[in-house]
Amino acid sequence: MTELIQQIDATLAQIGPALPGSLPWALLALAGAAFFAMGIGLFDAPPFLRIPISGKVSLGQEVARLRNEQPRRQPSALERALILPVAEALQRRAAESETAWLERALDLLDYPPPYSSTTDFYAQRVLWATLGFVAGALIAAALVSAGFAIFALIFPLALGLAGYQIPKSEINGKLKRRREEMLFELPYTLDRLGVATVAERSLGQGLVVTFSAPQGGYLAREFRQVVADYLRAGRLVEALERMARRNSDVELVARAAERLAMAEREGTDVLNAMRVVGERARVIVESMIEERGEQNQTLMIAPTLVALVGIIIAVAGPSVALLFRGLGF
């Protein structure tokens, strides 16, 4: 085995003499490619990388699951000592617009893990920025040892800044998926609500019957909030109008809530309002499915492109490095 490794190292050294320690870098690149492939689902992770699941069942976890509650993770001692103080300092210095956006986004997403509070958002920023800076420093150290001192500060700062932006990009991605899920749920949800309204002869009671159980996606959660407001204050129109304002980023859902509120306030046909919005939602969902199918056809070649880029870097990288060294950089 040792002889095989030495042969591989010698071969890589002949291919890329400008990069010292070719075997560690090759193994690191291989590990990164493997984790990337596992992350996008090209193949399953090996058993030793999977988290073991205990056979015991926690009663508290089952109650939280039935209530649709997310379990809150307690920060470790290291997080409390190093990360949380910096995160709290960033939170105090954050602009009011960013704080308002963050609170609204987490509320709409029902505080998805690992964001059980706004402080967790800034803790994730500190963590990802630190990881990016460390990774950039390692890359810069390798390039400096190869004679490229110009990259000593570029990579740590660039990767640190990129890591700092990861939590915000993640939340924006979750908000986008939320909008899509609500549009997909809307036709079926309005059909259920229409049947319950006819059976109960009242929109308010139809909402109570349909959304009394803590189940469903984001749209069901919004209607459950309407039911809670209606049962607490007895004002269905105002509850629906609040739902429309909360979901202004999902135009069709806001329009559905406004139409239901208008029909309830003016005494017009509620079922007709549901039917109009439901038909519009079906058209949008069908177009989204067709668009997603076209995108998937394009994305099917992405793994091939990643492999091709890796091959180009492995083959042309040493030659480019020798060229820059010959030019005196």
Image (cartoon, grey):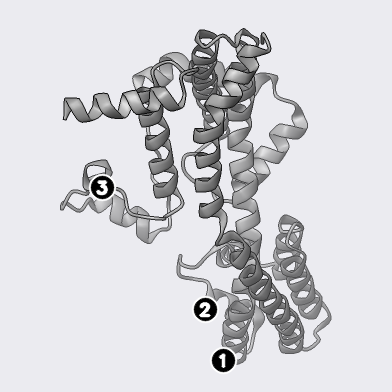
- Residue 329, given in percent of the width and then of the height, sits at 66, 10
Residue type, label 2: Val
Circle number at residue 209: 2
Is 7 rendered above or below residue 86? Answer: below
Is 306 rendered above or below residue 244? Answer: above
Q: CA distance from mark 3 to mark 2?
A: 46 Å
- Residue 283, given in percent of the width and then of the height, sits at 72, 81
Residue type, label 1: Ala
Q: Which residue is mark 1?
A: 199
In this orientation, which residue lies closer to the viewer: 98 or 161? 161
Q: Mark 1 packing: few (<14 Cα in 10 Å), some, or many (20+)?
A: few
Contact (Cβ within 8 Å) of mark 3 with mark 2: no
**Of the residues under marks 2 and 1, which one precedes in the sequence?**
1
Judge depth for marks 3 and 1 and give the one in front: 3
Q: Mark 2 packing: few (<14 Cα in 10 Å), some, or many (20+)?
A: some
In this orientation, which residue lies closer to the viewer: 243 or 311? 311
Contact (Cβ within 8 Å) of mark 2 with mark 1: yes
